[in-house]
Amino acid sequence: MDINKVMVIGAGQMGSGIAQVHAMAGMKVVLHDLKEEFVQRGLAQMTKNLSRQVEKGRMREAEKTEILDRIQLSTDLTHASDVDIVIEAAVENMRIKSELFAKLDQIAPAHAILATNTSSLPITEIAAATNRPEKVIGMHFMNPVPVMKLVEVIRGLATADEVYEVVEALSRKLQKIPVEVNDFPGFVSNRILMPMINEAIFTVYEGVATPEAVDEVMKLGMNHPMGPLTLADFIGLDTCLYIMETLHEGFGDDKYRPCPLLRKYVKAGWLGKKSGRGFYQYE
Ligand code: CAA
């Protein structure tokens, strides 16, 4: 099956990045969100990223225009009626995702794949909200989407082999590397990344070292491009807490207990870069 038209639900940091890479690979894209201002913000983000490519001499202005012309903005879910795949990148809330997938199942054509960019919620449970669980799959992109090579492709319990193969080929068309994983809490990426971030927060909480020192150790000693606390601020501390809670609940093991300092920051509204303050302060 060829993917010619894609709908991306959610025009935030992840959704706009996902829309951009599909349009760059020549596909028609519908970028959908609840409000016009959200989709306009997504468009502004994509325009900024593409303009940077033009400034750096890696893309012609005409190419940028062609890419942006392939993107249609939407606040109406019925635009899913003629797409080949929907990639959902909305908020991490099971009730909202289940309702959305039930609606998409009604609107999208019978052949369409329904994918989710969830970072930790069970694909199998999202699929159960539809009458096409064999066509539901996880397609987990990494932030920043235009830069990061990985797509973690997650098979739900009922995901059909052909659907996996289409998504694998699509990921390669986006110049990304798909990696196949099964549906368990946090998949592979966040099962390993988030406990490391949580442990870095415990290290600060217990007074072992400052955030700056923890980040220096991991950057200079382990060659990580960002220290774990800078990365936590970049991902969003609310997202980090949510993923730790999903791991804690899903495995029932105390080793996934979120650090009280992480809870405190989230309660204070210190959500990282997006709110201007997390482990570090941003202007
Ligand atoms: N959007 C688009 N492009 C971006 C970008 C963004 N938000 N941020 C950086 N870039 C681009 C820059 O434009 C630059 O490209 P050029 O060289 O072509 O100009 C390139 O990335 C490198 O940027 P910088 O030189 O400014 O900075 P850097 O070398 O530190 O790289 C980084 C930035 C790629 C973000 C790097 O720090 C990095 O890899 N950090 C770790 C990112 C990571 O771990 N992501 C996964 C998070 S977990 C996740 O996403 C999943 C989840 O479920 C939580």
Image: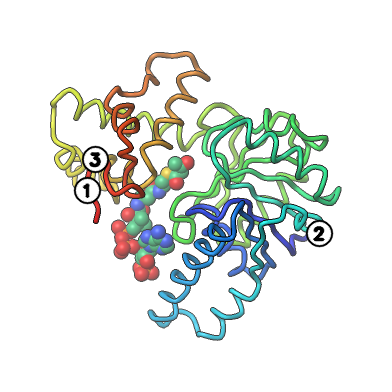
* Closer to us: 224 or 257: 257
Picture coordinates of residue 133 (x, y %)?
A: 77, 35
* Closer to us: 204 or 41: 41
N-term mark: 2 or 3: 2
Label 2 is placed on what type of residue? Asp
Q: Quadrant of ligand 1?
A: bottom left
Question: In the picture, residue 82 is in which quadrant?
Answer: bottom right
Q: Are marks 3 and 1 in contact (CB under 8 Å)?
A: no
Q: Is residue 21 above or below residue 181?
A: below
Q: Nearer the viewer, mark 1 or mark 2?
A: 1
- Cα–Cα gap, marks 3 and 1: 7 Å
Q: Going by the image, does 127 lie left or right of 243?
A: right
Q: Going by the image, does 4 lie left or right of 180?
A: right
The residue pinned by badge 3 equals 279
The residue pinned by badge 2 equals 82
Label 1 is placed on what type of residue? Gln
Residue beneath the point at 26% across and 32% down: 200
Label 3 is placed on what type of residue? Phe
Q: Which mark is residue 20?
A: none
- Cα–Cα gap, marks 1 and 2: 44 Å
Q: Which mark is residue 281?
A: 1
Q: Is residue 268 above or below residue 34?
A: above
Residue beneath the point at 48% across and 73% down: 50
Q: Are marks 1 and 2 in contact (CB under 8 Å)?
A: no
